[in-house]
Image (cartoon, rainbow, N blue to C red):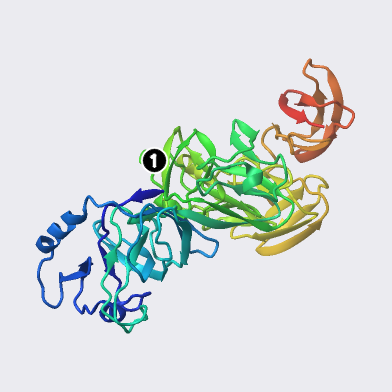
Amino acid sequence: MMNELDYFIPLIWEQDGHFSPNYTERDNMYAVNGIPHAAFQGQEMIVGGIGGGNMYSYYLPIYNQFIFDNSPVYMDLTMLTNASGGVDIEADIVMTGNLNTTNNKILFMLTYYYSASYCATVSRYHEESFNLNLTGQEATFSHSFDLENSWDLENIKGVVLIQTFTSSGNDYDGSYGPYPMYPIHQAGITGVTLDPDVELTLIHQDDWNMVGLPLGVEDSDYLTLFPDAIANTLFSFGEGYSLETNLVEGTGYWLRFDGYGSTTMIGDDFEEITITLDEDWNMISGVSNPADVNSISDPYGIIVPNTIYSFGEGYNLADVIEPGLGYWIRSYTEGSITISSTAASGKSKFVNRLTDANSISFNGQTLYFGVEIPQEEILSYSLPPKPPAGALDVRYEGDWKVVKDDGNIEIMNNSNELKIDYEIHQDNWVLINQLTGEEYSLTNSGTIDLVGDVTGFTLMKEDAALPSQYALAQNYPNPFNPVTTISYSVPFSGPISLKVYGLLGEEVSTVVEGEHKAGFHTAQFDGSHLSSGVYFYKLSSRDQTLTKKLILMK
């Protein structure tokens, strides 16, 4: 973006320790040892420092003499960031008149506005010969400057002017002076506001990732932003997962890769974003810089505490919203929140009820058991919707990460190996493999290593009483192809049947039938002989029938 500045730009040279001209060099160059100072058409006045005084009354009539003069030089400036982290200033110059002076120079200056808007500190400086002097001549001049990491890009400007150097000495080298400044023109002195392009490098893991858009970009196509992503794997979340092609700021997405790697994005940064949440679970993303989760503005208290999750090797509670990543967040109701990288972090009001709980982890994903959570806090211990197939996920039936007594554990394993670590603080427990029926006693702490397909476990106290009633769990996985596991409970010994039916009520398969002992049971259903669709499975005993729905997808 370019804006033309009329007649002059007040500048103050930075002090020693920065790039030229610094304080000592300024004294040599201009024979001025007071700061700040100003020079116009070779006339120098002390504003501060030695001599004191006020230059305004002296300067104004001189300024008015030149206000209507036409400049013999036209400049068109651009300034952009470069790959090395600095800026390039380019001046396209056309001579609209003749220059009658010699020893002309073009001066490039990078200025920084620390606080005041009416003056700029010259932080970078470069000069070179200016060899145009006749009407119609044109050329492009350019120079690159580095930047300081602490600078706010919005406060940086580039300034270019034409100047005649007249002195008994040689060209400026820090030892000759004085060198009065003679601006050839006034209206052509031009300042350019930096286009604040920011470069971010984002790391992704193998397989599924939760991603977001951390910069304002012209092309938000997912394959443009993530060229090594697998095609047709960008999914947003609403009423289920939806296939997308473009990313939107503030929204989180699933995206799949076929290996570890990174991608670099260039665009405009933003420090704050307001996001509208739906009731229940939402996929979101943050801003261009990290933001503490406790700094999120939630004026109406709609965020369910302790429900902001990232995804790595499974779901993990997040402390920071990182740029370029996607996150799950649960909301009590519809409403808006604001994420800002500059907002102060508040204190979390969440009380963790799991400090004394037993724990069990599956390939690093931890569940808890043996504690009771107050009903009004139970949503804080819920888990987001399951990730796409192929990712690691572990949870209790019903999408929980804690149970009081017994529970069915659902497993999505992305490897053939399963490492189970447990730590028991109270009671003795038993873990039952739902596929094989094998039981593992959980006492104190230990590790169980399994190889092969595992879809779920049943967890219960080792001395637990038999089930008090018939129960039929949701099959897992669901949808499935072609095999799924069904868990059920029988409170009394006797005949039971577990059958599958079509939508019209026709029986299509018998899974289990006959005498059963009281206890917890699992069975596998193979739907390879059936077509894709919705089916029902029914558990029947002498005096009770329970029914649930399953989905076969081939």
Q: Nearer the viewer, residue 54 or 391?
A: 54
Identified at 78% across, 40% down, the residue is: 522
Residue 406 in sight: no
Q: Nearer the viewer, residue 475 or 383?
A: 383
In percent of width and height, residue 113 lies at 31, 61
Q: Nearer the viewer, residue 51 or 6?
A: 6
Q: Is residue 93 left or right of residue 508?
A: left
Q: Amino acid at mark 1?
A: Gly
Q: Residue furthest right?
A: 529
Mark 1, Cα crowd under 10 Å, few <14 / some 14-19 / many 20+, is: some
Res 51 → quadrant: bottom left
Q: Which residue is mark 1?
A: 301
- The quadrant the C terminus occupies is top right
Q: Nearer the viewer, residue 99 or 158?
A: 99
Residue 98 in sight: yes
Position of 241 relative to 146 (above/below)? above
In percent of width and height, residue 188 lies at 33, 54
Q: Is residue 345 left or right of residue 399?
A: left
Position of 454 relative to 146 (above/below)? above
Check disc 1 and report its element: helix, strand or loop: loop
Identified at 10% across, 73% down, the residue is: 52
In percent of width and height, residue 64 lies at 16, 54
Q: Residue furthest top?
A: 504
In percent of width and height, residue 31 lies at 23, 79
Position of 518 relative to 143 (above/below)? above
Res 110 → quadrant: bottom left
Identified at 32% across, 68% down, the residue is: 164
